Amino acid sequence: MTPEALLQDKACEIPASDDGLAETFDAWTRDTVRRTEHALAALLPTSDTLPARLHEALRYAALGGGKRIRPLLCQAAGALAEASPDALDATSAAIEMIHAYSLVHDDLPAMDDDDLRRGKPTVHVAYDEATAILVGDALQAQAFFTLSELPLPAERRIALVRELAEAAGSRQLVGGQAIDLQSAGRSLSQPALEQMHRMKTGALIRAAVRMGALCGAADSPANAGVYRALDDYSSAIGLAFQVVDDILDAIADTATLGKTAGKDAYDDKPTCVSMLGLEASRALAAELRERAHAALAPFGPRARRLGQLADVVIHRAH
Ligand code: GRG
């Protein structure tokens, strides 16, 4: 059964209460980031596990940094679908492992060749290139191992594995990266650029939302539209995330970003800003924000966290 069929067959029961939303957004964010960190720290091999240097580098790559946007999205979508906190924590950690691996590999000399990530030296600089490749490989395997062990029925675990494998594979994340590498020094049409962004950046963001919903108890046919609405929402913010990333790369400084600013222009990569200009890129981000909020409208205040996260994605400074 596909994830869609699974959720449409047993659509998510949305809680009728407003429980949990009284907490401020900042407090919720802090708590969710802390729980993600805790789950990652527990799920990754300890740094004295043989081979110790590899595991130290693996923890260096995954712990203690990043905005944790994907875990926040997964948790907010999961709360809407009444998912268990334990399943959501481990699922969020698995998604973040894939994300961390993609950053480590993206920073390699053979790809973007960057020496700064999350405000610290990239893994191949702090360790060495071979270690960075192996760290990415190991994080990817650990992500799927983590999903296989979730405290959920087997059918749902398979749906989650499938969802993440699709998002991380050659038709999405890896394919988007391949197109990105091929496109340096070339111009792309706007639809081709959008397609690349949806694959490279949007796919994992969309998967984070869908996987949060998939973790939830999905028992009421009355809520068959939930998954589709969340999909519209996540498609809009997935693309918006990259549009804003392009804007920030063009206007922010390295200290604020925690990674090298102006890299896209330096590498002669087509971006929203290079193709549409700054103002049109900002207008596109605002339009995508509206689209995300419109998709959430049927949920009312219960989707407030997802609405707030859409605003964070659009208005973030790094
Ligand atoms: C190597 C298979 C493979 C894929 C690499 C992630 C990626 C694809 C490239 C990174 C280059 C980049 C700047 C992409 C744009 C959007 C993006 C994914 C930014 C990084 O994500 P954030 O901002 O990072 O969520 P933090 O550090 O906050 O987790």
Image (cartoon, rainbow, N blue to C red):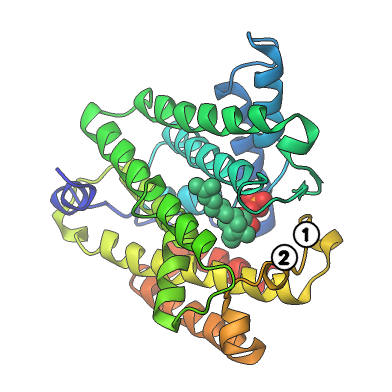
Q: Using the rendered view, name the quadrant where residue 255 is placed.
A: bottom right
Q: In the visual, does 318 lie left or right of 167?
A: right
Q: Using the rendered view, name the quadrant where residue 60 is placed.
A: top right
- Would you name the residue on which mark 1 appears? 260
Q: Using the rendered view, name the quadrant where residue 50 is placed.
A: top right
Tell me the CA gap for discs 1 and 2. Answer: 6 Å
Quarter of the image with the N terminus is top left
Q: In this figure, what is the number of numbered marks?
A: 2
Q: Position of residue 37 (x, y in %)?
A: 64, 35
Q: Position of residue 61 (x, y in %)?
A: 68, 35
Q: Nearer the viewer, residue 193 or 119?
A: 193
Quadrant of ligand 1: it is: bottom right
Note whether ligand 1 is within 8 Å of mark 2: yes
User: Is residue 64 in view?
Assistant: no
- Looking at this view, name the residue that lies furthest to the right: 255
User: As displayed, is residue 98 above or below residue 16?
Assistant: above
Q: Residue at x 58, y 75 (%)?
A: 271
- Residue 263's label in the rendered image is 2
Q: Position of residue 241 (x, y in %)?
A: 55, 67
Q: Position of residue 7 (x, y in %)?
A: 21, 50
Give the residue type that dot 2 points to: Lys
Element assignment for label 1 = loop
Q: Nearer the viewer, residue 258 or 5?
A: 258
Quarter of the image with the C terminus is bottom right
Q: Residue at x 68, y 48 (%)?
A: 66
Q: In the visual, does 25 lie left or right of 126?
A: left
Element assignment for label 2 = helix
